[in-house]
Image: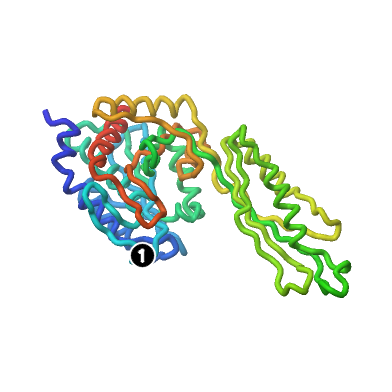
């Protein structure tokens, strides 16, 4: 009897060709026409490999989101991924060199989508599909923070028993992700009062000086013992050097490992008080992704995947990472969620982004076994 590994190994060339087709359909997040064209390529691959048509969720400005359903049953397994990328069209070459396959978005995360399609195809061809609906949700704006897809992700997640996210594994150790930090973006606009820097500086309120005090306070909000970080990553303001600056602005990135820390930081940032009594502060922004916290249900999913990997001859570890994904939204709804089930490689969002070809079949096989058992 042919095994899942035998089937996928025999089809490795076709898996890699499908990955290349999807990568060549370049899809920078803010180019709706390109993202939708990539969505058509993806839909054709689903039709060719799984004989299913897409549910299309139209968007006015971003690319349309796509859903695909295979199988039937009361239980639902949600496979979650995105097909937008950070790369402008033509920026990166697409090539295979020795055991590396390079291309825009190949690691983050087009290879993972194709591995998931082939994992389900293998189960279907070998009559090993679980008695459940397997639901794919492929979104178009994850690299922008999922502004138009978040609601759809949450709806699909709460209708599911488990969520499997085919984002790439960690670059170091190729681990699955059982926890991710939540993230937030905030902006603080500071208004002071202009004055002549030489003749009457005492009549001014220096917005940049106020900014300096606020940066010190904002960084004091971090709590490394709880995994909470605060980074003022953007400052701007002022103008002519002989003028007391009237305005300045701060951009703030925060990362948290727990929901209550996100609430604490958001409240603290919005309640910042000016150091100078005549300066004014205006804060905008919010927590954009809740944290994905490790749970017993997540651990159970990981142990299934780890056992499958061991039987395939490779070691599988778990990790908690600082970056977020759409899996954060699913986990925050209390749905068992396992992330990092996609390709292995290195350099997401870097010019040498690539996957490791020799791991494609084993990782796809591990994913198939996980789908079969959950």
In the picture, residue 276 is in which quadrant? bottom right
Q: Residue at x 37, y 43 (%)?
A: 168
Q: Nearer the viewer, residue 131 or 43?
A: 43
Up the image or down, 117 lies above or below 128; here it is below
Q: Residue furthest left?
A: 1
Residue 102 or 18: which is nearer the viewer? 102
Residue bearing the label numbered 1: 91
Q: Quadrant of the C terminus?
A: top left
Q: What colouring method underlies this structural image?
A: rainbow
Q: Quadrant of residue 87?
A: bottom left
When the figure is inspected, residue 353 is found, relative to residue 178, above or below; the finding is below
Percent across and percent down for residue 319 are 44, 33
Front residue of 333/119: it is 119
- Residue 306 falls in image quadrant: top left
Picture residue at 42% right of the left edge, 58% below the top: 86
Residue at 37% x, 53% y is: 83
Q: Estimate the x, y position of residue 311 in percent, counting from the top left.
A: 25, 25
Please tell me whether mark 1 sits on a helix, a strand or a loop. loop
Q: Position of residue 62 (x, y in %)?
A: 45, 61
Q: Residue at x 71, y 68 (%)?
A: 238
Mark 1 surroundings: few (<14), some (14-19) or many (≥20) residues within 10 A: few
């Amino acid at each position: 009897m042919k095994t899942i590994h035998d089937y996928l190994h025999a089809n490795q060339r076709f898996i890699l060709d499908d990955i290349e087709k999807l990568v060549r359909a370049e899809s920078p997040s803010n180019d709706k026409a390109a993202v939708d064209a990539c969505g058509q390529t993806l839909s054709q691959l689903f039709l060719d490999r799984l004989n299913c048509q897409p549910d299309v969720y139209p968007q006015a400005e971003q690319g349309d989101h796509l859903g695909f359903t295979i199988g039937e049953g009361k239980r639902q397994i949600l496979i979650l991924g995105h097909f937008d990328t950070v790369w402008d069209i033509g920026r990166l070459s697409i090539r295979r060199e020795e055991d590396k396959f390079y291309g825009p978005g190949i690691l983050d995360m087009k290879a993972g989508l194709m591995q998931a399609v082939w994992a389900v195809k293998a189960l279907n061809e070998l009559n090993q599909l679980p008695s459940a609906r397997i639901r794919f949700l492929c979104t178009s704006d994850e690299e922008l923070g999922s502004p138009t897809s978040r609601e759809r992700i949450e709806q699909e997640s709460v209708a599911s028993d488990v969520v499997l996210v085919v984002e790439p594994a960690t670059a170091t150790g190729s681990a699955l992700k059982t926890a991710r930090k939540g993230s937030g973006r905030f902006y603080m606009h500071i208004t002071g009062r202009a004055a002549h820097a030489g003749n009457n500086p005492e009549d001014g309120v220096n917005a940049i000086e106020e900014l300096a005090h606020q940066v010190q306070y904002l960084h004091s909000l971090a709590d490394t013992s709880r995994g909470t970080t605060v980074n003022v990553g953007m400052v701007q303001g002022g103008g002519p050097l002989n003028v007391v600056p009237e305005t300045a602005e701060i951009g703030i990135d925060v990362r948290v490992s727990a929901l209550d820390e996100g609430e604490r930081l958001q409240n603290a940032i919005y309640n910042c008080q000016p150091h100078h009594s005549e300066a004014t502060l205006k804060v905008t922004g919010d927590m954009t992704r809740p944290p994905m916290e490790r749970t017993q249900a997540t651990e159970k999913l990981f142990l299934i995947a780890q056992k499958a990997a061991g039987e395939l001859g490779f070691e599988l570890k778990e990790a908690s990472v600082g970056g977020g994904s759409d899996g954060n939204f699913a986990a925050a709804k209390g749905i068992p969620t396992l992330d990092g089930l996609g390709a292995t490689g290195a350099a997401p969002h870097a010019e040498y982004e690539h996957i490791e070809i020799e791991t494609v079949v084993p990782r796809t096989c591990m994913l198939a076994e996980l789908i079969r058992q959950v």
